[in-house]
Image (cartoon, rainbow, N blue to C red):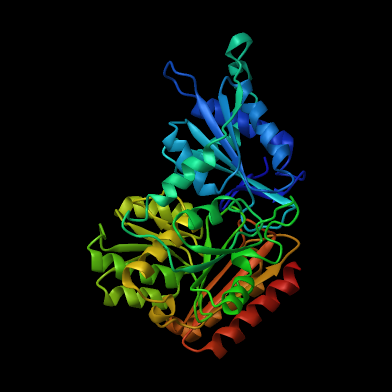
């Protein structure tokens, strides 16, 4: 039995294992079986997608699987991942499914699943689905005759989500006078992103809002903030916002061209929420990738950083456990648990713009929000993803460096959970040391896996 689920749902190249229509059909059946409401009302599952060409393929396969289990399906079409998380709870659905490979290129796709409360599934529930995908023992549970599910299209889904987004901005604040750039990565935010900013009064300059099924994330979006930076500086904008293909992560460029990552944004929001007395616990949640400088910043503010594995669902789980309001990843997933159940790039942008209007300041006046430790990140494409223990040269080198340098360095090396890559992160008290060590580890991985 080959493993299906990774860091963030199922992901891979479309029409190749595990992202085949056959697997998607079985996933639909498994979700229908596990989440089918045991009460008397008709069970329903909401399905949304980003703008990839292969979205049609998996939308149809998932719908067939769900309907075969007697579940009604509500098709939303292109919408950000956090939009499905919101709608699943708002419409009292039994589950929500997003067809997206997030920041990956167009030829990849993925399946993310949310429970009835709008939260991503824990590992245990994903394992249940995985077992059912390969197990036909629940075939007798298929619906027959008039119990077969139906499929419907929801036409006002984006409007509902837009209303939800605007609700985070106080009624006495609008964005008039702000010139806002937005890069939607030719992805799921291409309609709702500019719409919401304009309806709140901003002068919006949008780029990469013309998806054709093949150009999602192509040299644009949150992974390529240089595009929105160019727009900000050329047009003298107040701020630039770059989103990824499914809209759950954000990169920000301020009015001076400074880049704000997820750690920077968490520091800014933390200080603002302390000032407003909004924090519900002494914890902020990050991941193993979170810069140590943010941890030191939080300590000075009397707060504790909780680190989790990479993946915003792990961040959310820790936030729920600790009662934390704020959490996120360096990559730009920012979670406000009072307003959302997953990372939401647009919601983050609206809260950030609200602060700027309330303070009547430019974002650059807050930069940098804290002093960072030098951190080098290298991604290496590999032919196979072995564990570190299966690469003796690498594991031995890590052990030697940890013994020699101790707390002077922080090393994180792992296979990606979403792409055929190995990720190397080295953090140190000097950039030259971090860079030298990162390159050394990367060379070892290339020799053994590339």
Residue 334 seen in this snapshot: yes
Residue 78: image location, x then y, percent: 62, 44
Label total for image? 0
405 is higher (above) or lower (below) than 259: below
Q: Is residue 189 left or right of residue 61?
A: left
Where, quadrant-wise, is the C terminus in this rendering? bottom right
Q: 47 or 295: which is nearer to us?
A: 47
Report the front residue among 240 and 310: 240
Q: Nearer the viewer, residue 438 or 284?
A: 284
Residue found at x 51% / y 60%: 310
* 209 is higher (above) or lower (below) than 162: below
* Identity of the residue furthest to the top in this view: 145
Q: Can you give x and y, in whole percent of width and height, for residue 137 in the image? A: 62, 22
Looking at the rendered image, the quarter that the N terminus falls into is top right
Res 225 quadrant in image: bottom right
Q: Quick check: 441 above or below 413?
A: below
Q: Residue 4 at what x, y percent from top left? A: 64, 44
**With 433 as the anchor, is 320 left or right in this view?**
left
| Residue lying at the far left of the rendered structure | 277
Q: Is residue 69 above or below residue 230?
A: above
Res 134 visible = no
Q: Which of the two residues, 24 or 107, is positioned nearer the viewer here?
A: 107
Residue 163 appears at what percent x and percent y? 43, 45
Residue drawn at (77%, 45%) of the image: 16
- Specify the quadrant of the image occupied by residue 139: top right
Choose top left, top right, bottom left or bottom right for residue 334: bottom left
């Amino acid at each position: 039995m080959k493993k299906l689920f990774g860091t963030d749902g199922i992901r891979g190249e479309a029409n190749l294992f595990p992202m085949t229509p056959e697997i998607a059909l079985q996933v639909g059946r498994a979700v229908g079986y596990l989440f089918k409401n045991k009460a008397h009302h008709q069970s329903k599952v909401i399905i949304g997608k980003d703008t990839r060409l292969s979205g049609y393929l998996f939308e149809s396969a998932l719908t067939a699987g769900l309907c075969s289990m007697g579940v009604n399906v509500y098709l939303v079409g292109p919408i950000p991942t956090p939009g499905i998380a919101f709608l699943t709870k708002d419409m009292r659905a039994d589950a929500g499914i997003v067809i997206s490979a997030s920041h990956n290129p167009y030829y990849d796709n993925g399946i993310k699943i949310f429970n009835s409360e709008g939260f991503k599934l824990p590992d245990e529930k994903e394992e249940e689905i995985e077992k059912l995908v390969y197990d036909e023992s629940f075939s007798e549970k298929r619906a027959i005759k008039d119990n077969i599910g139906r499929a419907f299209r929801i036409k006002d889904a984006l409007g509902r989500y837009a209303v939800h987004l605007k609700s985070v901005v106080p009624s006495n604040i609008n964005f008039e006078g702000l010139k806002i750039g937005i890069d939607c990565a030719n992805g799921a935010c291409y309609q709702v992103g500019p719409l919401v900013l304009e309806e709140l009064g901003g002068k919006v300059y949008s780029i990469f809002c013309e998806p054709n099924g093949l150009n999602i994330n192509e040299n644009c979006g949150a992974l390529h903030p240089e595009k929105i930076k160019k727009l900000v500086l050329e047009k003298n904008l107040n701020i630039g916002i770059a989103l990824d293909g499914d809209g759950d992560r954000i990169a920000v460029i301020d009015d001076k061209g400074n880049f704000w990552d997820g750690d920077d944004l968490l520091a800014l929001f933390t200080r603002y929420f302390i000032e407003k007395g909004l924090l519900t616990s002494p914890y902020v949640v990050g991941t193993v990738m979170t810069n140590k400088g943010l941890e030191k910043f939080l300590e000075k503010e009397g707060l504790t950083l909780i680190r989790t594995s990479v993946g915003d669902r792990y961040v959310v789980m820790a936030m729920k456990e600790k009662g934390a309001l704020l959490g996120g990843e360096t990559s730009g997933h920012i979670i406000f648990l009072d307003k959302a159940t997953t990372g939401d790039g647009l919601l983050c942008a609206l809260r950030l713009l609200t602060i700027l209007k309330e303070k009547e300041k430019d974002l650059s006046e807050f930069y940098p929000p804290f002093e960072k430790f030098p951190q080098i990140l290298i991604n290496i494409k590999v032919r196979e993803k072995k564990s570190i223990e299966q690469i003796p040269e690498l594991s031995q080198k890590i052990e030697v460096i940890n013994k020699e340098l101790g707390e002077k360095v922080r090393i994180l090396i792992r296979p990606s959970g979403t792409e055929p890559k190995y990720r190397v992160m080295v953090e140190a008290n000097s950039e030259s040391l971090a860079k030298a060590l990162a390159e050394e580890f990367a060379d070892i991985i290339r020799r053994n896996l590339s």
